[in-house]
Amino acid sequence: MDCIFCKIINGEIPSSKVYEDDLVYAFKDINPEAPIHVLIVPKKHIESAHQIDESDFQSVGHIHLIAQQIAKESGIDQSGYRLLTNIGKDGGQSVSHLHYHLLGGRQLKWPPG
Ligand code: AMP
């Protein structure tokens, strides 16, 4: 499958790995928008959060626990952070493999543009 995040998970494309287990892979965003900007992705190819079904509940729930762990290890669990996923064109999704952005290390603005 011609998916850049599948290739990162397989090791075909290099990445700055932050965490890996059987279900998820996390790596530093190549174009960080904040001092901490990590992408957390399920190893299973799911196009976006709009394609999640019951069989994905374990990996998607697990991503939230891993986000907590990464935030703690990054020293932003007390100051706060943002965990978000973009969906489709108008949602700003540029890579069609479900991924959660973990952003922190500065005051983040709301609402987004
Ligand atoms: P989105 O726009 O929500 O689909 O987010 C895609 C993210 O993937 C962007 O923040 C990109 O900077 C990031 N990205 C694209 N290619 C790579 C790569 N090879 N390694 C790390 N991050 C990447």
Image: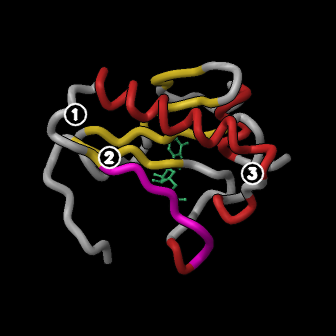
Q: Secondary structure at mark 3?
A: loop
Q: Earlier in the sequence, mark 1 or mark 2?
A: 1
Amino acid carrying label 2: it is Leu
Residue at image location 78% in from the left, 50% down from the top: 54
Q: Is residue 66 above or below residue 30?
A: above
**Mark 1 sits on what residue?**
76
Tell me, yes or no, whether the highlighted magenta stretch contains residue 44.
Answer: no
Residue at image location 64% in from the left, 52% down from the top: 98
Q: Secondary structure at mark 1?
A: loop
Q: In the rendering, at what x and y percent does residue 39 appear? A: 48, 41
Q: Earlier in the sequence, mark 2 or mark 3?
A: 3
Q: Which residues are magenta?
A: 82-89
Amino acid carrying label 1: it is Ile
**Mark 2 sits on what residue?**
103
Name the side, left or right, on which 64 lies relative to 110.
right
Name the side, left or right, on which 89 lies relative to 38.
right
* Mark sitting on residue 64: none
Name the side, left or right, on which 48 lies relative to 31.
right
Displayed quadrant of residue 75: top left
Residue at image location 62% in from the left, 72% down from the top: 88
**Mark 3 sits on what residue?**
46
Amino acid carrying label 3: it is Ile
Q: Residues within 10 Å of mark 1 (few under 14, many from 20)?
A: some
Check contact, mark 2 vs mark 3: CB within 8 A: no
